Each structure stands twice: as C-alpha cells, then as structure tokens.
Image (cartoon, rainbow, N blue to C red):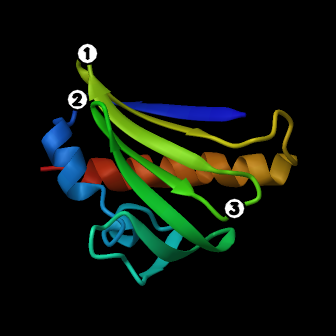
Amino acid sequence: MEWACTLTPEIPVTELLARCTLANLPALCADVYSVEHVTTDGAYAHVGCVWGEFEMERRPIKNGVRFALISCPNAFQWSITSRHGATVVHGSINQMQPDPEFAESIVDFMQNFCTGLRQTTT
C-alpha cells in the first residue's frame, strides 16, 4: 500500500539532501524519537520511532532522497523528491491491505513528516 503528500512550492533538491539526514529525522518528524549509531557516511543508523526500533537506510536518489526501515517486517520506506514545481513525499509498505490502525499510523507519520519538512525549510 502507498501514501503520498505534496508540498508546494518545490523545495530545492540541494536543500532536501541537506535537511533530510538520518541525524535530523527527529527534528523533521515527531514520530522519530531517536537516531543512534549513524555510520560515518550517513547511510545507516538505528532509529526509535512510533512502531519500535529499526535499522534504517538513507540513500540519495534522483531529485531527492529515500529512507527505508530495512529491518521492518512491513518494509516501510519513504522518498522525498522535488521536480515540476512540487516536492512529493511518497511512502509504501509491502502489504496491500494492512490493519486499519497500522495504516492510520502511517498516514499520521507521513503528515507529521510533511509538516516537519515544511517547517524546517528556509
């Protein structure tokens, strides 16, 4: 299943890459409580979030960045990309019909992330 939100005006990709780091996740999203053991390249960390504790990966992608809870049984990932005048935050899991409460928690996470990204953008 997937979810998305759109932010306008577009946040420049260079700004996305600078702000959307593992270390900065708690400032971007109230649902991320802790980030520990960030690797020197900034690509991996251990995070505590609304669903528990997981290993997380951050990767630059074309026009943005992708985060993935790599040890999550639901394979939750979200990407933030900017193009054509908008910034899109797109998240997905590996289930087509998740438990309604879990799906609602993902909606809340996505909204909180988008709100945080909007508030921290210069």
The image quadrant where one finds the N terminus is top right
Pointer 2 residue: 10
Image disc number at residue 111: none
Where residue 14 sits: x, y (%)?
A: 14, 43
What's the residue at 81%, 40% (across, down)?
95
How far, Cα to Cα, is label 3 from label 2? 30 Å
The front one of 91 and 72 is: 72
Q: Earlier in the sequence, mark 1 or mark 3?
A: 3
Q: Pointers 3 and 2 in contact (CB under 8 A)? A: no
* Mark 2 residue type: Glu
The front one of 46 and 111 is: 46
Image disc number at residue 84: 1
What's the residue at 66%, 65% (across, down)?
71
Q: Residue furthest bottom?
A: 37
Q: Pointers 1 and 2 in contact (CB under 8 A)? A: yes
Callout 3: helix, strand or loop?
Answer: loop
Label 1 environment density (alpha carbons within 10 Å; few <14, some 14–19, many ≥20): few
- In the rendered structure, the answer to whether residue 42 lies left or right of residue 104 reads left
Q: Earlier in the sequence, mark 1 or mark 2?
A: 2
* Mark 1 residue type: His
The front one of 5 and 77 is: 77
Where residue 34 sits: x, y (%)?
A: 47, 80
What's the residue at 38%, 66% (across, down)?
25
- Above or below 91: residue 32: below
The front one of 60 and 19 is: 60
Q: Earlier in the sequence, mark 3 or mark 2?
A: 2
Q: Pointers 1 and 3 in contact (CB under 8 A)? A: no
Pointer 3 residue: 72
- In the rendered structure, the answer to whether residue 12 lies left or right of residue 56 reads left
Where residue 57 sits: x, y (%)?
A: 47, 60
